[in-house]
């Protein structure tokens, strides 16, 4: 065995209310266990992150796949991405209405097309061609949230560009529960994947960081892998997942890299709703998880553990660079 395999998953930054934290922790535990089983069998990091993210997409406790957040006009538009650190191949999808596992479609885009990022009808056609399953992603929980979110929006009478301000004032209502995974396999390959329903009450057509390679997801065998969660517009402007990988490339451990990246968020974008969470693995098998959000629901597992360890917080970073 060349490397000791390890997987880290997240179920989103934001505020995890006590009544929902049980299902969240259970979900990330199951995802980490499923992904680690793939690695323990000698499977690839790429397969491990896909399987881990698919578990969370099916769960209903997260803002990804079934249970995705609703847009302002009460629809679901899911997005996801996946990246293979060995080959730097990547696949991403967006504006999906009813694909059961967006992460599997992202992988198909990566492996079966010449493209990296396909959205909407075009992506759904690829899903059809390859027989991917469909599922109505609208859950009762999200319909309840949507009503609460709309009430908050209406009461404050903010136009939509101020949505982030509103979310800052009502962090419990606008929860961020995107899912993601990073892994290192026995061969020393890393991979990352991220999947989301996007920011609650987003304008239809809005694309966040999660499907954008370098922003929400990045993996490179030269340094490591990263998946982001939080306010997509923040991660996009700082190309956050690639920034974490650059830090690792310059010699920082996964933990130092995610902490430095959160400090960068706090330094460069201090005046907006900048709630973020990051997970990473470096090529030596060190892991990192950091956030400036109230919570980060996450779990990890390696071959020294008989079961995954899950938590609702990691390294909470309030400081600047
Ligand atoms: N990053 C996601 C987005 O902005 C949301 C999340 O992480 O929950 O679409």
Image (cartoon, grey):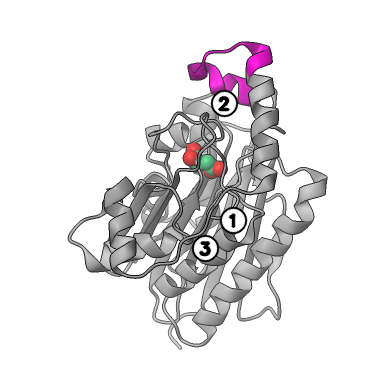
Residue that protrudes farthest toward the left in the picture: 114
Query: Which residue matches tag 2?
Result: 273
In depth, the one of 216 and 66 nearer the eye is 66
Identify the element where label 3 is drawn: helix
The answer to which of marks 2 and 3 sits earlier in the sequence is: 3
* Nearer-N-terminus badge (1/3): 1
Which residue is painted at 51% across and 30% down in the image? 73
The answer to whether the residue labelled 1 contacts the one labelled 3, judged by CB atoms less than 8 Å apart, is no
What secondary structure is the stretch in magenta mostly built from? helix
Q: Is mark 2 within 8 Å of ligand 1?
A: no
Q: Residues within 10 Å of mark 3 (few under 14, many from 20)?
A: many
Residue 155: say if magenta: yes
Is 2 drawn above or below residue 200 in the view shown?
below
Q: Which residue is mark 3?
A: 53
The residue indicated by pointer 1 is 10
Is residue 38 left or right of 167 when viewed as pictured? Answer: left
At x 25% / y 54%, what residue is drawn? 116
Residue 151, located in which quarter of the rendered image?
top right
**Magenta highlight on residue 60:** no
Q: Given this view, does label 2 or label 3 mark the residue nearer the observer?
A: 3
Q: CA distance from mark 1 to mark 3?
A: 9 Å
Q: Secondary structure at mark 2?
A: loop
Give, as a single range, the part of the protein colored magenta: 154-167
């Amino acid at each position: 065995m060349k490397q000791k395999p390890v997987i880290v998953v997240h179920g989103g930054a934001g505020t995890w209310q006590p009544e929902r934290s049980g299902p969240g922790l259970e979900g990330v535990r199951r995802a980490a266990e499923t992904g680690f089983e793939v690695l323990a069998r000698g499977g690839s990091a790429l397969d491990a992150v896909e399987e881990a993210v698919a578990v969370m997409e099916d769960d209903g406790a997260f803002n990804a796949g079934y249970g995705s957040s609703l847009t302002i006009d009460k629809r679901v538009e899911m997005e996801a991405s996946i990246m293979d650190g060995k080959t730097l191949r990547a696949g991403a999808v967006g504006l999906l209405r009813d694909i059961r596992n967006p992460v599997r479609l992202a992988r198909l885009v990566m492996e079966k097309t010449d493209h990296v990022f396909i959205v909407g009808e075009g992506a759904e056609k690829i899903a059809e061609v390859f027989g991917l399953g469909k599922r109505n992603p609208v859950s009762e929980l999200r319909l309840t949230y949507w009503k609460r979110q709309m009430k908050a929006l209406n009461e404050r009478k903010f136009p939509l560009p101020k949505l982030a301000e509103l979310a800052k004032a009502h962090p419990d209502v606008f929860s961020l529960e995107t899912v993601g995974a990073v892994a290192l396999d026995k061969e020393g390959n890393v991979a990352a994947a991220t999947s989301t329903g996007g920011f609650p009450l987003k304008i239809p057509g809005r694309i966040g960081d999660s499907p954008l390679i370098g922003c929400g997801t990045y993996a490179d065998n030269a340094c490591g892998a990263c998946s982001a969660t939080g306010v997509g517009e923040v991660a996009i402007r700082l190309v956050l997942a690639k920034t974490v990988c650059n830090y690792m490339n310059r010699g920082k451990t996964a933990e130092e890299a995610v902490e430095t990246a959160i400090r960068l968020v706090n330094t460069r974008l201090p005046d907006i709703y900048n709630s973020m969470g990051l997970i990473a693995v470096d090529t030596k098998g060190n892991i990192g998880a950091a956030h400036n959000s109230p919570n980060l629901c996450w779990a990890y597992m390696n071959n020294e553990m008989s079961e995954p360890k899950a938590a609702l917080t990691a390294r909470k970073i309030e400081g600047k660079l």
